[in-house]
Structures are given as C-alpha cells and as structure tokens.
Image (tube, helix red, strand yellow):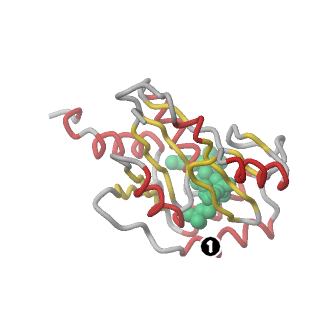
Amino acid sequence: MAARLIAVVGPSGVGKDTVMHALAASDPSMSLVRRVITRPSDAGGEDFDGVTCDEFDLRVARGDFCLWWDAHGLSYGIPKSQIEHRPEGTVALVNLSRSILDEARASFDGFRVISLTANPETLARRLGGRGRETQDEILRRLARAGHARPQGEDVIEICNDGALDETIQAITVALYPERAVR
Ligand SMILES: Nc1ncnc2c1ncn2[C@@H]1O[C@H](COP(=O)(O)OP(=O)(O)O)[C@@H](O)[C@H]1O
Ligand SMILES: O=P(O)(O)OC[C@H]1O[C@H](OP(=O)(O)OP(=O)(O)O)[C@H](O)[C@@H]1O
C-alpha cells in the first residue's frame, strides 16, 4: 500500500467525522475511507456503505475487509479496496475503534493515530445536537466514552473541546511540524 493510513479515534460525539472532513478539506493529499456498516443507509452522518448483517458476514468470509469490528450493536468493516491503489504520498483518513488499533499497527507501515478528546459535558451536548441516535443509544455511547485513551509513539492526542479550526491547526502542526509558521 502506498498511501499512509491515519486513524481518527475517540469517544462518540468527540468530533471524529467532523475533524476528518475538515482535514480532508484543508489538505488535498488527504481523503476519507468509506466504511461498511450494518446501519440503515439513510441514517445520516458520514458517507458509508450500509449493508445487512448477512451481507456483512458474506464480505468477511470473502476476505473483503482489512479490519472489522463490532460496536454499538453494529458491525463495521474497512474494505481493502478502499485502501489499496491510493497514490504514494497521500493519506487515507479512517474512523476506527480504539479496540482495533494494535491490529491496524501490525498491518500498515507508517500508521498514525489521532486520538481526540473532549470533556463529558461536551460529548453529551454534541451527541444530542447530532440527532442520529435515540436518548437510550446516546446514554450507552456516553457510558462507553471511558474507554482507555490510546497510548504509543504513533499517537497524537488532541483536545477537540474548542473551535474546529484550532483542532485542525493542532493536528496539522503535530503531523507536519515543518509546516508550522515560525
Ligand atoms: N470542534 C467542534 N466544535 C463544535 N461542534 C463540533 C466540533 N466537533 C464536532 N462538533 C459537532 O459535534 C457533533 C458530533 O460530531 P461527530 O463528528 O459526529 O462526532 P463522532 O464522529 O466522534 O461521533 C456534530 O454535530 C458536530 O457538528
Ligand atoms: O471502540 P470505540 O473506540 O469506542 O469505537 C466504537 C465505535 O464508535 C465509532 O463508531 P461510529 O462512528 O459509528 O459512532 P460515533 O460517531 O458515535 O463515534 C467508532 O468508529 C467505532 O466504530
């Protein structure tokens, strides 16, 4: 694989999708990986490939995915076809579960992790504002937010409690220190 894989991870509502879109909009060398999810296609939010559980299992058996996992009562898969054949020097941004990072590390050279954080009040407010989940689902997602923060030399931890522009600037500086204004 020629493109570098950068995972964006963190608790529900922290802003993974929003930050990924803003990064891709700010840098033409970055683009998004489209996930396969067992969620109704019209659920809104990210652009994803919505499939039934049977179809998901079929794709696993066929070897379509390089990474897959279960969370929130859903199954998520990263198609190999979304990662392969991306040009050298480009970045593939992918929204991953924190539970799959070691597997991703073992599979992709140059893999990096952007770990987003925000305080619990911010998460609750943002999930309510997003409106994709029911109140019960939101409570379950918030209960999962305490998942251990990813550790490692490949992890960039960024707080997304503030303005989106500040988050994008902080990520860009961390990924590309040479671009920082002196
Ligand atoms: N820095 C930010 N400032 C204000 N609102 C934000 C920020 N980042 C994300 N949001 C909002 O928070 C909500 C959840 O963001 P989303 O990207 O769906 O999070 P995640 O993918 O981590 O669950 C969305 O409504 C989004 O517009
Ligand atoms: O193991 P965790 O790190 O807690 O992650 C669990 C799942 O939550 C996110 O999914 P999704 O984007 O569907 O949900 P979200 O937008 O509410 O975060 C993430 O992409 C994982 O699929």
**As drawn, 49 above or below 75:** above
Q: Name the residue nearer the viewer: 165 or 51.
A: 51
Position of residue 45 measured from the top left corner of the image (x, y, whole percent):
71, 43
Q: Is residue 11 visible?
A: no
**Quarter of the view holding residue 87:** top left
Q: Residue at x 54, y 67 (%)?
A: 99
Q: Residue at x 49, y 51 (%)?
A: 8
Q: Name the residue nearer the viewer: 66 or 154.
A: 66
Position of residue 173 measured from the top left corner of the image (x, y, whole percent):
28, 42
The residue singled out by tag 1 in the image is 144
Q: Is mark 1 within 8 Å of ligand 2?
A: yes
Q: Name the residue nearer the viewer: 149 or 101.
A: 101
Image quarter for ligand 2 equals: bottom right
Does residue 114 appear left or right of residue 74 in this picture?
left
Q: Quadrant of the C terminus?
A: top left
Q: Please, what is the three-letter code of the amino acid marked with disc 1?
A: Arg
Q: Quadrant of the N terminus?
A: top left
Does residue 37 appear left or right of residue 175 in this picture?
right
